[in-house]
Image (cartoon, helix red, strand yellow):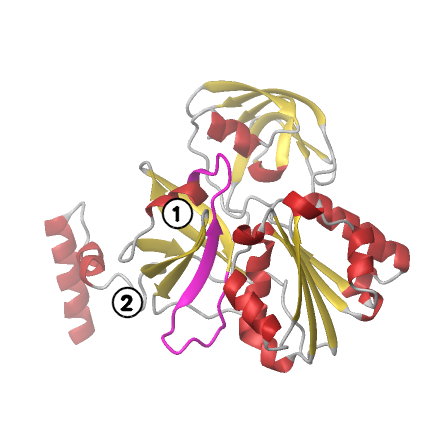
Amino acid sequence: MASSLRDRAVDLVGLLTTPILPADYVDLFDPLRAGAELRGRIVEVRPETRDAVTLVIRPGRGWAGHTPGQYVRIGLDVDGVRQWRAYSLTGPADRADGCITITVKAIPDGRVSTHVVRRARAGMLVHLDQACGDFTLPDPRPAKVLFVTAGSGITPVMGMLRGALDDLEDVVLVHSAPGPADVIFAGELRQLAARGRIRLVERHTDTDGMLDADALAALVPDLAERETWACGPAGMLDALEARWAGLGIDARLHTERFRPALLAVGDGGTITFTTTEQEVDADGATSLLDAGEAAGVLMPSGCRMGICFGCVAPLRDGAVRDLRTGELTTASPGDGVLVQTCVSAAAGPCQIDL
């Protein structure tokens, strides 16, 4: 009876306050409460380099935790539009204060990353998904480990080092950045090296050139004996995968890409976004997502690598090509075909229901 009366009271309040619901008022006072939409509050913004910052975030009570090396999708409003991006978790899973950290590097034309680096402030709320990803250390830990990173590729590896270094006996980290001042987490990494916890090899591309597989083999002669985790630009990862496969040790190489490996390029075509009636001419290497955003179409997105399915949209008519595999997907009106806009490109004229 008490529960029924409480439910009726809530319904009555809802009628009186429509379109604002009672839960909306509660969100104003306790947005991180259990049962609420998962969010987090930024409690600290910590500069790392001239174009990278670490956000310390207190997640809501629905946060299920993470394994170092995983990533989390965060949503925030940029110019009035909710944008979602995926960032690696850079802290251990058992911080005493219960907070999580992500580290964001501003990239050219990066709407969200630039917004975070320039405008994020303590007290701001962000939307969260649960942690995802399998770029993690196994249990039991390997005896000998090699990490190969470049630029912001250090971020998932930093999570592993902070969360599991005490369990690792022999660690080599080869990290590439334009110059010494561009190394994210430079002070902490160099301290670990000075204390003998890791062997750190810094490569500065402005003076040393790009890191390639041959250079890596010279820097780490015993790499074939090491379980390896690599994260960085696609070209570097492609070269490492080819070298490890050639040595017959590809099972020992684990890679994390911030962008999907794009293998197939077609002829492109005219993309029609049916909701806004906008038409965009795009080449065969430009994803539907990028083409739509460039034209100002409101496009749902998430990881932008074909993993999270946050960008799925109906293909009403026409054909698109999967940029990872070259596979064609076609649809006619009424077929109900869904495509991932972040890894699909026009393969002739096509209509997307957005």
- Whole-number angstrom distance, CA of label 1 to CA of label 2: 24 Å
Residue picked out by circle 1: 116
Q: Residue at coordinates 79% horizontally, 64% vertically from top-left? A: 220
Please indicate whether residue 6 sits to the left or right of residue 296 in the image: left
Q: Earlier in the sequence, mark 1 or mark 2?
A: 2
Note whether 314 is above or below 16 in the view shown. Answer: above
Residue closer to the observer: 308 or 239: 239
Label 2 sits on residue: 33
Q: Position of residue 350 (x, y in %)?
A: 59, 23
What stretch of residues is rendered in magenta?
A: 89-111
Secondary structure of the residue carrying numbered label 1: helix
User: Is any part of residue 69 visible from this angle?
Assistant: no
Foreground mark, 1 or 2, reads 1
Residue 304 pos. (x, y %):
55, 44
Q: Residue at x 47, y 30 (%)?
A: 293
Q: Secondary structure at mark 2?
A: loop
Q: Mark 2 belongs to which amino acid?
A: Arg
Q: Is the residue 168 above or below the residue 350 in the image?
A: below
Report which quarter residue 227 is drawn in.
Answer: bottom right
Residue 316 percent location from the top left of the image: 55, 28
Membership of 110 in magenta stretch: yes
